[in-house]
Image (cartoon, coloured by chain):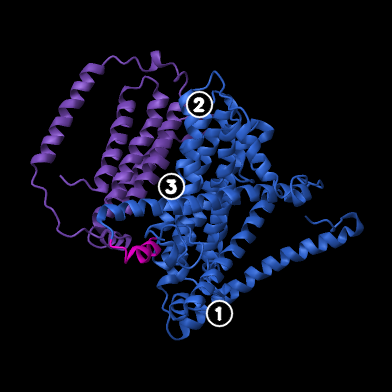
Amino acid sequence: MKYLFDSLTANWNLSPWMTTLALVLWVVVITAGVLVFMATFAGFTSWVERRIAGRMQSRIGPNRVGPFGGLQWLADGLKCFLKEDVIPKATDPVLFRLAPYLVFPGGFAAFAALPFGYGIAASNIDIGIFYITAITSLVVIGILMAGWSSNNKWSLIGGVRSAAQIISYEIPGGLAILTVVVLAGTLNMHELVVAQGGWPWHWFIFRNPFTFVAFFIFFASILAEGNRTPFDLPEAESELVAGYLTEYTGMRFLFFLFTEWANVWVISALLTTLFLGGWQIPGITDLGATIAAATSLGKWFWVLLSVAMFFIKTSALVFLVIQIRWTLPRLRVDQLMIMCWKYLVPMGFVTLLGSAIFLVLPREGAWAWFHLSVQGIMTLIGFAIVAGLIGRAWYNIHALKDRISLENWL
Amino acid sequence: MNITFPDIVFVILAALILGCGAIVAYSRNIVRAGFSLLGAFAGVAGLYFLAQANFIGAAQILIYVGGVLVVILFAIMLTRGIAQAHSTNPRQMVIPATLMGLISAAMLITIALYFPWRLRPDAPVATVHSLGNALLDTYLIPFEFLSLLLLAAMIGAVMLVRKEIKESGKEESR
């Protein structure tokens, strides 16, 4: 959002010191805005997740506070504020208090580089996606710190499991990211979206068979990095109580959960940006040129439409991520490591190489038709898979006849 | 003297690095020493960001915080009885070590002050593109050589820790 600041302060004639101060103030304002978005999203998602979980487990879920229980998250947040902050005697007090403050920025800082729409990103740094992968590794340290300082075996096992899982899954995740970075030739999040198009067959996921596989590798790895089921071994409640969060209470506990739910948004936004065309609007080939040509009111319309596109795609993925959590059983530790090192990492290398081969293939003449038909076939396959899943769900619902109630959806 | 905003940030970051470094060196609790490394690494990354070397800064965080530090902490946490500071960290050599540190610091500062550094009049714009091109063009052979070295180190590590399963089915370390 630096360009907005520049255009705002262009005719103010500020002294260098005042400009710096104004810039610092601007950064604070933007950060506060992103923080508010993250907080409300995390809270709202906690309610959505609990409602969906309730439906999937044939119960109701929170329904008392507000319409359909929609204000439950505010009540929970207030409750955590008022709870006593218990710090057990046997803990390492300094590290125990510090850990939530390391986990929180690790999850929050990723929001800085997410492109929410055309030109709507807190910071448009040239290393966007690399920055996000780097900064989220702060979470590992925080989790290890929480696990160790709790002085509790379950916490320690949870912390070490989480760290092992995150640093292992960073590798297939990084390879899958590289697969699309090779195609786009940039690490900048904005340019990664620009390299794709509005219609599904322009998206990176359907660009060639290898990126299609890379999408699923990335999905699995980033779910594991976010400690989401089926990879939530660090918090496996059947064996570890609550893993590294066992000893935490009140706001410190909430900080961990905050990060976890905010991570759901980061996961979905990254998938949208890298593979599903980000904020691109179907039918518009060059959004930048369209916005430059539009009137001042039209500019707002196009920008808001791009934001809406991004939110639709990301929200759909958030919904999917939540459904995956309540559908799949948890993996075992050895299965987790086998899946990462024996399957995802070699597959990641193959997708990277294959995508690079597609990149060096010529694009002129008959080759253009080849590329177009590959994209078309991949899109058809993708939609066939989605249609198959929907069909199966439809069949299952109808096979149950009156034993399932589809009323009272919320 | 004209103090600018980057100067203030630099002083804060330097204080962070030195403070955390002191904890790493002097803390008797080796776990806390390990976690203090985080501050030192993050401070160095901050210095890179201050110098507008975004890529190096992010790489510093990714490799040192996300990789090296985690491995160090793993090693610390998997060692038995590490929390007993008296047996694991007796702190016998504080004075000689401090003296050695001060001497080497004095040498480094002297070199830094007297070396004729070449100042570039224009701020270099180190984008990822130019870095990538330099690595795969001008410096291709050193780059590949380093990759080979890392690969050799990795294979060596695997060879050292590998277990061989004998025909009887009994595992035996090599």
- Residue A233 visible here: yes
Specify whether disc 2 shares its chain with disc 1.
Answer: yes
- Give the magenta range: A2-13
Relative horizontal placement of residue A395, taking residue B149 as reference (left or right): right
Determine whether A15 is above or below B47 in the image.
below
Q: Are marks 1 and 3 on the same chain?
A: yes
Q: Which chain wears blue?
A: A
> Which one is earlier in the sequence, the residue at label 1 or at label 3?
3
* Residue name at image x 14 percent, y 35 percent: B109
Q: Could you tell whether A249 is left or right of A349 in the image?
A: right
What is the distance, in whole Å, between disc 2 and disc 3 at their CAs? 22 Å
Q: Which is more toward the observer, B29 or B171?
A: B29
Q: Position of residue A249 (x, y in %)?
A: 60, 30
Residue A149 is tagged as 2
Q: Position of residue A63 (x, y in %)?
A: 77, 47
Q: In which quarter of the image is the C terminus of chain B?
A: top left
The residue that disc 1 covers is: A283
Residue position marked by numbered label 3 in the rendering: A135
Residue type of the residue flagged with mark 3: Ile
Which one is in front, A371 or A408?
A408
Does the magenta stretch mainly form a helix, a strand or a loop? helix
